[in-house]
Image (spheres, grey):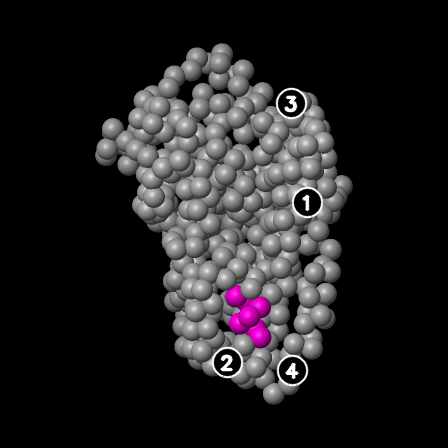
Amino acid sequence: MLATTLILLLVLLALSLPVAGALGTLGLLLDQIYSQMPLTLALGEVAWSSSKDFLLVTIPMFILLGEILLRAGVAERMYDAMVKWLSWIPGGLMHSNIGACAIFSATSGSSVATAATVGTVALPLVKKYGYNERLFLGTLAAGGTLGILIPPSINLIIYAVLTDTSIPKLYLAGIIPGLGLALIFMVTVVIFCLVRRDWGGQTLTATWPERFRSLIDLLPPLGIFLVVVGSIYAGLATPTEAASLGVVAAMVLAAAYRRLSIAMMKEVLENTMRTTAMVMLIIIAAYFLNFVISAIGLTTMLTDFIVQLGLSKVEMLIAIVIFYLILGCFMETLSMMITTIPIIAPVMFGLGFDPIWFGIVIIVLIEMALITPPVGLNLFVVQSLRSQGTLNDVITGSVPFVAAMVLLIILVTIFPDIVLWLPRIVG
């Protein structure tokens, strides 16, 4: 049964069906093959129950927030400030890419929006200043993944809904690993540029007065971060309400930059509805698939198989990392979370893993999936911004950063307080 399910899933994905279509079709096929009763009769109830959670309202709110910021002119000003502060380090503008992604991540909650926004600003500078194009592309694809680790994060909300875990604690837990991963990315760039000095491009300089004046351009995104995350921890708003406050703050910012218009809001709302519809369709299809595999006994079979392996905690964690590395090559990240976490999380919690800690590990593994071929979304996002070159350039440039993410998982495994310290002292 398990082998049949995996083969069917890979075949459906290979046919280039939309992810939601592939998951839903797989559920229908498993229903026809293995179920003694028509499980499709429960489809309406599954669709309703999977969509009615109040926390899910945060998804369109954060998508809307990212869409407004994308068009408000925040990225250009923020990136210019990062250039003034970071371009002196070996690797120059590549550090600005990572720094800008980290800051934008603290407002958008989306890896794709982060990679697209910063990439649009940064890519024209590759050849102008003589950088190694592949490594430069890699910093954009990898830097964009920070959007789902540094709060506010849509994927952390999905994890919280699936495992009944505290969103505020997950948000706190993601801050230090998110900033730490950005630092590891920057160290990776420094190492490559010290070994191959011609990869680092032209060094840009700025005076200290110019740097201090540029700080004002970093205040808007940091201000929105404080509005969203700060309102949660101050007890002023729930995560859903905080996302709405972020949207209001983003609209005020767009108005201040004279970018707010009816035409702009029409485009923002259309893109928000399109993206939200895609996300919710994936959620409904994945929940239906989970319902089917539970009803036919596949969940119990898989759980029993994992338990019977008799692996230690460390061995199980290594197996999970390898599992997600392989699965991430074939599945879209959101559907991968929804279809696997309900099965894997209870097993890991039963072994004694902290739900908050495990949530951050899962998000880092999901980040890897964003930059591993053949379906890494960020790879395609960055490639779509280029006027020439192949996807292989982006893939090659992203490989060192996959290794950097593995290093982060090793560090948080050895030193779990990297994840748990903030939730413990604030909570």
Q: Which residue is mark 4?
A: 38
Q: Nearer the viewer, mark 2 or mark 1?
A: 1
Residue 95 appears in which quarter of the rendering?
A: top left
Q: Earlier in the sequence, mark 4 or mark 1?
A: 4
Between marks 2 and 1, how big is the CA–CA gap? Answer: 38 Å
Mark 3 belongs to which amino acid? Tyr
In magenta, the rendered stretch is: 22-28
Q: Nearer the viewer, mark 4 or mark 1?
A: 4
Q: Secondary structure at mark 2?
A: helix
- State which tag comes first along the sequence, 4 or 3: 4
Q: CA distance from mark 2 to mark 3?
A: 57 Å
Q: What residue appears at the point 48 percent right and 33 percent down from the top-left corner? A: 120
Left or right? Give the position of 345 relative to 257.
left
The tag on residue 98 is none
Q: In the figure, 403 relative to 251: above or below?
A: below
**Picture quadrant of residue 62:** top right
Taking the image as drawn, is residue 299 in sight? Answer: yes
Question: Residue 257 has which mark?
Answer: 3
Q: Please, what secondary structure does the residue beneath circle 4 have?
A: loop
**Residue 56 at x, y = what percent?**
68, 54
| N-terminal label among 2 and 1 | 1
The local crowd at label 1, few if under 14, some if 14 to 19, many if 20 or more residues have their Cα within 10 Å, is many
Which residue does the numbered mark 2 point to in the structure image?
Answer: 301
Residue 372 position in % (x across, y down): 39, 52
Label 4 – label 1 distance at C-alpha = 36 Å
Look at the magenta stretch and give its main secondary structure: helix
| Nearer to me, 287 or 354 | 287
Q: Amino acid at mark 1?
A: Met
- Residue 163: where, in percent of width, then height? 61, 62
**Outermost residue toward the right?**
236
The magenta stretch spans residue 26: yes
